[in-house]
Image (cartoon, rainbow, N blue to C red):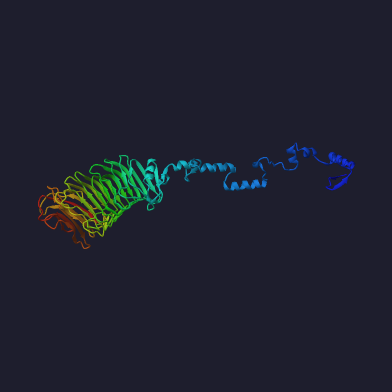
Amino acid sequence: MTTIVTRTGKGSSLSWIEADANFTNLNTDKLENSNNLSDLTDTAAAKTNLSINNVDNTSDVNKPVSTAQQTAINSSITTHVAGSDPHTQYLQESAAAASTGASLVGYTRGVTGATTRTVESVLYETVSVKDFGAVGDGVTNDTAAFVSALATGKKIFLPNGSYYITTLTITGRTEIQGESRDGAIIQGDGDLIYLSTINSSLHLSDLTLQNVTTRGVLVKVTYGSDLLESSFSRIHFKKAQYHIDTNRGFGPSIVDWRLSECRFIDASIVSRIYGAIWASTEDQCYTWFCNKGIQFNGNIATVRITNSVFELNGLEAIFVNLTTNATLRGLEFDSVHFEANGQTIATSDIVLNGDPATAIIENLTFINCGSFAATASPTISIPTPTNIPIFNNLSFVGCKDFTISAPANGSRWSSIEYRNDFQIKSLSGPSRLLGVVGGNNVVQVASISIAVGEAHRVQAYTGNSGAGAVNVYQEYIVSRSVVGNISVATVADIAGGGAYGVVIVAGAGVYTIQNKPAMANTYQPYIIVDKL
């Protein structure tokens, strides 16, 4: 007897005859696909019949993952890396992180007409000193990083920080822009920046320059000939001997230098000392607590200082020191405020020094300027002895509390316009007149009409015509009251009070300008009459 398991799963004791009969039935009609299960020669068909056709244990990477699991994985990757195929996105992300990754990223500036470029092309327009290892902690010497950045020839960006350097030598056009004026600081001891070749051109913006311990020059021109084009915008010049020094003697000049919105403080000698300077401007600058503001030591031509303040400096705000054969042909101050200069030694705000006798001053102009809390008078001083042979076209228009000292013998002035504190209106009749040479009581201007309620200002500059000197400056206010009376008030009689100059003689509705009674017959006045 034997025991066999039937299809019903129950075990029975059968005779051999019964067992043989049962196996016949099993092989013929009860077991489906018996050939696939018995010898497993058709694996794919067997797996399909059993619904496990995704199973392949021959390789670890091909082990089954359910559709739901795969969907969840794909969703997670897609969420992390936006895009279509997560495997492709992973490869792109890896490439973007490489050293050349910026070339794979597009950039379009948000303005009309902008075209798309790569981020790489945009970043190549400037370099940062940080690209070359600058630390910016105020202690580490970052000179090498600056030298490497300069060598690229590109615009240099200076992130906020304090960058200690030794002297930088500028040999070409250099542009450095800080992140903020008081946050990005270039500092060091002694001289900081040299402009040393004909191609040197420095353009600084939004940063601070200063010495740490040893004072020197913050920006210095060392090239021995003319130098063109530099600009300084929103720069804070601090502790130094000189903030800017371009003084290289009589001949070499700087041309087209522009300073705007700069602050100058704590220069122990002079804030800016210029040799020859042409076609240059300062606008919206503030100079205070320096020993001296600006000193000119050479030829000056078409220089304008506008909308600026000079305050609380130790000596003069402006010192014009004309050397041998030097000329001043155009120096203009427009809307400049001078206040309380001469804190160390009381002095005029502006000093003109014209020795020796070969200097020429022409076209010196002050428009809408003011002098307040002066430590000395006059506002503009021409020290004696001085021998400026030509002094032409001196103008004061709409200025407040401006005065000027009388020139010493040997100087000659012409075309002088002195109009302080008044609003000027037109006047019928003569307003500018070079008088005749003559002696006592010579009439220079006869019968100037003045209406009831009017006021005129009369200015006269009188000098010896043979010597070419101006010895006397006089200013009078002539007014006519509502009842018709004419009165004359003396405003200024500088170096006068004696025999030289003119007097005003009142008449009936008119007045006359004539020489003083005892004036020598070699003297001649220059007369200006304005209606107030």
Q: Quadrant of the C terminus?
A: bottom left
Count up the numbered dots. 0
Query: On screen, 309 above or below 111?
Result: below
Residue 42 percent coordinates (x, y): 75, 37
Left or right, residue 232 beside residue 436: right
Left or right, residue 251 beside residue 111: left
- Between residue 399 and residue 143, name the one nearer to us: 143
On the image, which quarter does residue 473 sit in?
bottom left
Residue 474 percent coordinates (x, y): 17, 55
- Between residue 506 and residue 43, name the one nearer to us: 43
Left or right, residue 263 beside residue 472: right
Residue 149 percent coordinates (x, y): 39, 43
The residue sitting at the bottom extreme is 483
Left or right, residue 376 beside residue 72: left
Q: Residue at x 21, y 44 (%)?
A: 326
Q: Quadrant of the N terminus?
A: top right
Say whether residue 425 is visible.
no
- Between residue 505 and residue 499, name the one nearer to us: 499
